[in-house]
Amino acid sequence: MPAPKQLDASSIFSRRFGAATLMVLLLVSQRSAAEDNTVYQYQEGLENFAISQQQFESTKENTFEQDQEGTQNSAHGVQKQERDSKIRQKQDGAFNDSHVQQQYGSDNEIHNVQIGAENNATTLQSVTHGNLALTRQVGFGNAGSISQLSGNFNDARIHQSGIANRADTSQDSGFYVKSHTEQQGNDNNASASQTGVGHFSVIAQEGAFNRGLVQQSGAQQEADLLQSGLANQSILLQEDDYNRASSNQSGNFNQVIIQQSGAFGLGGSHQSIVSQVGSFNATAISQTGASSNATVTQFGNGNSVSLSH
């Protein structure tokens, strides 16, 4: 990471005596001031461990960055009751693990970047507003998870490139939040769950044997699922009213399943749009409630459509 290392003593101790010393120094420096704190961490080698914590009622405009190169590294970050805080983590190697948490505040950002194999990234933002959570993974066997709880205008993004990746996004009890997931490769699994009003979710997958799932509960939700390749599955589930589901697939032996229902037997006014290009693709749409409509377009041979209202 090109950013200068402001904790020079910590960097020296970490290289000579290991990550345990680095962790202690960072915790002491964090408790020395209440505002405008900045922490930089850098680890190069094997089996390093680092923790940065910012926990003050008056905490604001804090930033800490963690950069790890090697194998079996672990990075954890916690920020609570903050404002305009930023966390950036980067791991280059294998068997790395990253956990990040932000609680209370607004306009916070979390960036996770993992390059290697079998890395894990978990991000949690709770009771926060207008925040961005970004996870980018390059390699194989990676897992990305973002949870945003009780917040409005939040944005969650996961980018994965490799094999057997998994991405899970959960956004609960808010207004106008966005979820964006991209995956390239085979056997990928992406899911997005949203509750509230006015949310938007998009999942884009390229490869074979991928599975995309979007679940939305609330009004005025929109979900788009795009897949290109062989034997992919697209599932969109929406509940309440005035929701829109769209799926676009190109390739063969793909499947689209859309279920739109009104909460407690009420609601409705849903819209479903499906486009499939290829052969032996299948679409199944189920809608309950008032004034819902569905449009299905298929090009190719051996395709099938099932509609129920």
Image: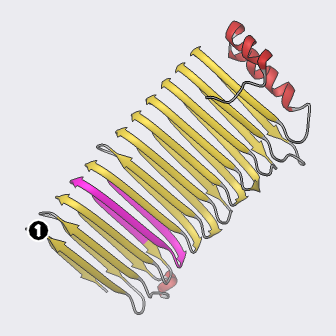
Confirm whether the magenta stretch covers residue 212: yes
Q: Which quarter of the figure is the N terminus placed in?
A: top right
Q: Amino acid at mark 1?
A: Gly
Residue 242 position within the rendered picture, expressed as x and y whole percent measured from the top left: 48, 83
Can residue 57 be seen here? The reply is yes
According to the picture, the residue beneath numbered tag 1 turns out to be: 300
The residue shown at (90%, 48%) is 58
Q: Which quarter of the figure is the C terminus placed in?
A: bottom left
Q: Main secondary structure of the magenta part?
A: strand
The residue shown at (50%, 42%) is 136
Q: Please identify the quarter of the rendering in which residue 116 is found.
A: top left
Can residue 46 be seen here? The reply is no
The residue shown at (51%, 33%) is 114
Residue lying furthest top in this view?
16
Residue lying furthest left in this view?
301
The residue shown at (74%, 31%) is 52
Which stretch did the figure color magenta? 211-237
Horizontal placement of 80 versus 177: left or right?
A: right
174 lies above or below 45: below
Residue 7 position within the rendered picture, expressed as x and y whole percent measured from the top left: 78, 22
Horizontal placement of 219 versus 191: left or right?
A: right
